[in-house]
Image (cartoon, rainbow, N blue to C red):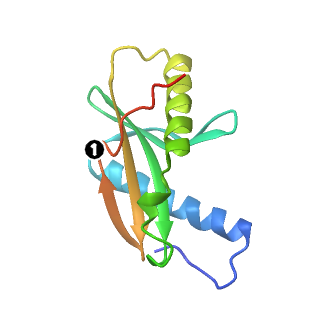
Amino acid sequence: MPSSRKGSSQEDRLKIGREYEELAAQFFSDRNYTILQRNYHAGHKEIDLIVQKGNVVVFVEVKSAKSQSMGHPAERVTKEKIANLTRAAQQYLIENKITDADLRFDVVTFLGGKIEHYPGAFAADERD
């Protein structure tokens, strides 16, 4: 489990977030997914992890929390976040000329260090 300190600065939170993203990547790798990209950026939008297994390309959002005192980490995947992830995924598909894959959006959470995987957590936001 990633280290934590009281009074985390923005830099500490980013470091811990990257450590959880690494654990999520290992989770998918252990299940025979190929890691296509980590921390993909499309402007200010970011996808934490992009993985593939067979013909399925999965866009993964990673969230973590020490406890549920502020709600479950999955609850922080808001409509706005979904819209941003969808736009970033569209950009990734265009840049990489991916036209014939099945697509999925997963959420991986870490609550108190324990991993939870939500495959197909949401559909793409197609409003534009």
Q: Which residue is the site of mark 1?
A: 32
Along the line of sight, the residue nearer the viewer: 56 or 82: 82
Along the line of sight, the residue nearer the viewer: 84 or 30: 84
Percent of width and height locating residue 19? 53, 63
Locate residue 47: give its quadrant. Answer: top right
In the displayed structure, would residue 36 be above or below residue 110? above
Give the position of the N terminus as an image quadrant: bottom left
Residue drawn at the location 39% of the way across and 55% of the way down: 108
Count of numbered labels shown in the rendering: 1
Along the line of sight, the residue nearer the viewer: 10 or 73: 73
Residue drawn at the location 49% of the way across and 32% of the way down: 86
Evaluate whether residue 22 shows in this view.
no
Give the position of the C terminus as an image quadrant: top right
Percent of width and height locating residue 61? 46, 49
Locate residue 12: give its quadrant. Answer: bottom right
What crowding class fits label 1: few (fewer than 14 Cα within 10 Å), some (14-19), or many (20 or more)?
A: few
* Outermost residue to the bottom: 6
In the displayed structure, would residue 29 be above or below residue 100? below
Locate residue 33: give its quadrant. Answer: top left
Q: Is residue 4 left or right of residue 108?
A: right
Evaluate whether residue 106 shows in this view.
yes
Q: Secondary structure at mark 1?
A: loop
Disc 1 marks a residue whose amino acid type is Asn
Residue drawn at the location 45% of the way across and 78% of the way down: 67
Residue drawn at the location 39% of the way across and 51% of the way down: 107
Percent of width and height locating residue 11? 72, 66
